[in-house]
Image: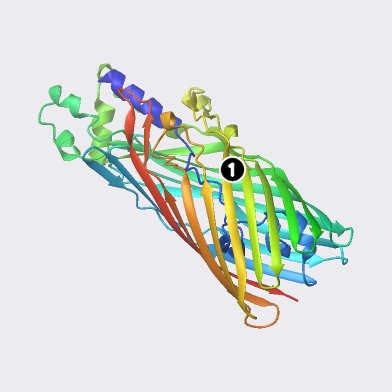
Amino acid sequence: MRKFLISTMAVAATVVMLHAEGYQLNLNSTKQAGMGNTGVALKLGAEGMIYNPAGLSFMKSGVEFAAGVTAVRSFVNYTNGSYEAKTDNPLGTPLFVYAGFKITPNLAAGVSLNNPAGNSIYWDDNWVGAAIVQNSALQAFCVQPSLSFKFFDDMFSLGAGAMIMWGNFSNSKALIPVGGLAGLSQLFPNHPVLSKYANEVPVSAKLYGDAKINYGFNVGLLFSPIPELSFGLSYRSKVDLKVDEGNTDITYAGTDMKEFISSLPAAVGVVIPPLDQGTFSASMPIPSNINFGVSYQPSETFLITAELQYVGWSAFDKLVIQYDQKVGNLKLEMPKGFKNTMMYRIGGQWTAYPKFDVRLGFYYDQTPVDKTLYTPETPGSDKLAFTCGYSWRAFTGFSLDFALTYSHGGLVSGSLPNTPGPFIGDYKVHAFLPSLAMSYRF
């Protein structure tokens, strides 16, 4: 009993800030979302500066503004034999805002605000995997000032941006799972607290903190050997989100449960670490990205584009949490073993009417998650996504944009080393992502 509880609490305390393999978001433009989230080889002006800052200099007017939001509704199902659990995730709302300014015919500047990473997953507080995760949420924000210059009669352009990034997170889990105190019934037969909370988590911990500002860069180029054909290449650097003074709250099922656990003799071995008496530091990466794409526009009304995206997920090899001296300088490490991945995208746009564009797209997204280190906090799977969208240019310079993405992950059987045995199960993931935006140029 003692060995089981101490091991369970140690494992629970090591899992912080980790989210599904989509915690990097590629939701930076409603127009591009409709075309499979392509963008590196497109000349969309201000709205394309996250995908490729070189496209900023192809603004069609002196000033451009764009703003939008995507609603992320994701679902995860877990099964193990006859047991089944489902998430009840809140609606995520990553946003983007762009402003671009043409300084000379060939030089443009701009600034963007977006959510480069974010995710939330909420399981039932008393589910079978509560000692791994009950709920978890992450938000990351990035401001990117950018410059772009084109030359050689618009054949070639370069762009660069400085990424200024920060964020916040929260994570809750059971320090003792449902049924974790059942063995005490031999020492305390018919104890009212044990029977009252037999089907509830006795004690949970919530970890939360703010990641301070850190920096990275985004560079890109566009090459158009002929006006109808463009090649794009961009690189976004890795940025570490670092929490220097994270906090922990400990919550008991009830006041009587807290009194009961506090009164237990040390020999019983039910020890709650004093995590709420100190602070911790931790770090997680927003991975680097290399994007290469090509676009072809055979006529004024039709455009097709394809893209490859290489994501440097191997930067997330392990998670290290360091508590301060108030918690005995406790240091916890947990291997993650993420691997680098590829995304394959294709999209197209058709101008159906002079003021109306229609878009379709598709992409395939590989998961970086190691199936032998698989947790319900990281329910990743290789995903297929189908996208569609449209733009309505109601009047000169103004565009109202809409897109819808459906992402579907295949069945994954994963396991997580644990004590007294591995946590295993089958997972299925899918999500709906409608997006709405407006843009105006003059």
Q: Residues within 10 Å of mark 1 (few under 14, many from 20)?
A: many
Q: Is residue 419 above or below residue 234?
A: above
Q: What residue is shown at x 42% (from left), y 40% (from top)? A: 377
Q: Nearer the viewer, residue 259 or 403?
A: 403
Q: Is residue 323 above or below residue 219?
A: above
In x, y percent, where is residue 324?
Answer: 53, 27
Residue 68: x and y in percent read 58, 66
The answer to which of 176 and 356 lies nearer the viewer is 356
Residue furthest left in the image = 190
Question: Mark 1: which amino acid?
Answer: Ala
Q: Is residue 318 above or below residue 389?
A: above
Q: Which image quarter is the C terminus in? A: bottom right
Residue placed farthest to the bottom in the image? 395
| Residue 229 in sight from this viewpoint | yes
Q: From the image, tell me which residue sits under label 1.
A: 211
Relative horizontal placement of residue 94, taking residue 61 as reference (left or right): left
Residue 378 placement (x, y as % from top left):
44, 40
Q: Quadrant of residue 311?
A: top right
Position of residue 432 measured from the top left corner of the image (x, y, whole percent):
44, 59
- 391 vs 261: above or below: below
Q: Secondary structure at mark 1?
A: strand
Residue at 87%, 63% in the rendered image: 106
Asked where in the image residue 108 lies, by quadrant, the reply is bottom right
Q: In the rendered image, is residue 243 in sight?
A: no
